[in-house]
Every structure is written in C-alpha cells, then in structure tokens.
C-alpha cells in the first residue's frame, strides 16, 4: 500500500466507525424513548432531539422511518440477548422471562405489535425481520424444550416444535391484547401455559 493510500483507507475506516457509532446511539435512544413514552406518542423529532441532531440527520443513517423502526426491533433483540442469558433447565425459558420484562416497556410492545401487523405486507421493510425472527425463536424454544425433556423436567410425550410454535403464537397474541388492555398478566399467562407441560406426564396405571 502506498503512503498516500494508507491515510485515505484510515479515514474511511474512521468515517465508517463514526457512522456506526451514530447509528448505535440513535437506536439506543429510540429504544429508551419509545419504551417509556410509547410508540404512538413518539415522533422522529422526539428521537432526533434526544440524540441532538435534526430529523434529516437521523434519516441520513436509515433512509426511512420504517427502516429505522426495523433496526430498533433488531437492536431490542440484541439488548435482550445481552441482558437475559439463555435459561438452563432449572429456570424459566427465555421467552417467559422476556414477557415479564416487556410489561415494564409498554412502548416497545406497541412497536412490536404495530410493525408485526404491518409486516404481513411482503413489501414492508420489517417483513423479513419477522420471518427470520419467527424461525429463530421457534428453533430456540424447541431446543430448550428438548433439553428439558432429556432432563426429565418436561412432558416427554409432546412434540417440542409444536409446543414452541404454540408458545410463540400465544406470546404474540397476548402482546396484542396487552397493548389494548395492560391489566392482562402477560408474563403470568405464558407461565401458566408453560406449567401445563413443565412436569412430565405421570405414567397411567391401575388405581389402588
């Protein structure tokens, strides 16, 4: 590499790093603002003001509001993975831990529910996010159930994939209900469903 090319490459790396840092700050800020102020009550101006830039500067990093919100969901998943380690067989599964946590950030539940409904349109920026997330989450829950079945702490006579799919569907449906009626016990209802399978089915035999 020439002496002239090296500084140019270094500047490009520096520019990229600054851009990545700015995007990360925007996403972290958006999570906090939406989580506590509410999705419907949060505007781009609110996020931009909190970050300390204009709306145009905000969209410079994401092009559209829809792209920004899609990245906010991905950032939320990343943060959740960092703060909630995968449960071992002696703990509640991750999806139930997150359900209890989500009751503390209603704005993010509103965001998730609203974008999930909009993402039924294949052209929506969040469509692929929800398709990918669906497969990943069901796979993780199923593997968790299989580990518990092997450990003898979960009903061995059920299909792990089927229960995983049911649990995710219940979680998504409950979040939609909870966004309308926050008196619903989101975490407790999921926990009650889980407890129907958490103990292995007792073998049937002649009564004494």
Image (cartoon, grey):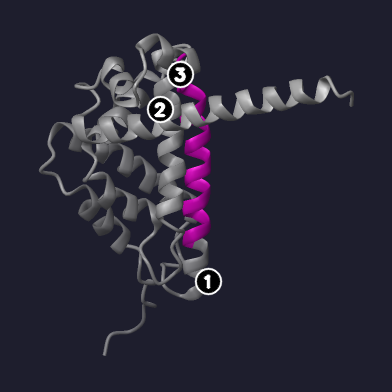
Residue 26 tag number: 2
Residues marked 2 and 1 touching at CB (< 8 Å): no
Give the residue number, with chain letter if any, for mark 1: 150
Q: 58 or 166, which lies in front? A: 58
Left or right of residue 27: residue 170: left
Q: Where does the magenta region start and end?
A: 124-145
Residue 67 tag number: 3
Secondary structure state at the residue bearing disc 1? helix
Q: How far is mark 3 from mark 2, CA to CA?
A: 13 Å
Is 189 situated above or below 199?
A: above
**Magenta stretch, overall SS:** helix
Residue that extends furthest to the top in the rendered view of this protein: 56
Is 120 situated above or below 175?
A: above
Which comes before the other along the chain, label 3 or label 2? 2
Left or right of residue 43: residue 182: left
- 75 in magenta: no
Identified at 45% across, 18% down, the residue is 67
Identified at 10% across, 43% down, the residue is 183
């Amino acid at each position: 590499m020439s002496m002239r090319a090296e500084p140019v490459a270094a500047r490009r790396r520096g520019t990229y790093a600054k851009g990545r840092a700015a995007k990360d700050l925007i996403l972290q800020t958006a999570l906090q603002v939406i989580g506590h102020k509410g999705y419907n009550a949060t505007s781009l101006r609110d996020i931009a003001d909190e970050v300390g830039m204009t709306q145009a500067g905000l969209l410079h990093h994401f092009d559209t509001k829809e792209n920004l919100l899609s990245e906010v969901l991905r950032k939320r998943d990343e943060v959740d993975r960092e703060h909630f380690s995968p449960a071992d067989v002696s703990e509640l599964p991750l999806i139930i831990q997150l359900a209890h946590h989500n009751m503390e950030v209603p704005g993010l539940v509103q965001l998730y529910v609203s974008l999930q409904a909009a993402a039924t349109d294949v052209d929506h920026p969040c469509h692929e996010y929800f398709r990918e997330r669906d497969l990943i989450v069901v796979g993780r829950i199923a593997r968790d159930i299989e580990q518990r079945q092997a450990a003898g702490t979960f009903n061995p006579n059920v299909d792990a994939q089927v229960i995983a799919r049911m649990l995710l569907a219940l979680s998504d449906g409950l979040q939609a209900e909870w966004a309308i009626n926050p008196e619903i016990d989101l975490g407790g209802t999921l926990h009650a469903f889980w407890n129907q399978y958490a103990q292995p089915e007792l073998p049937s035999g002649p009564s004494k």
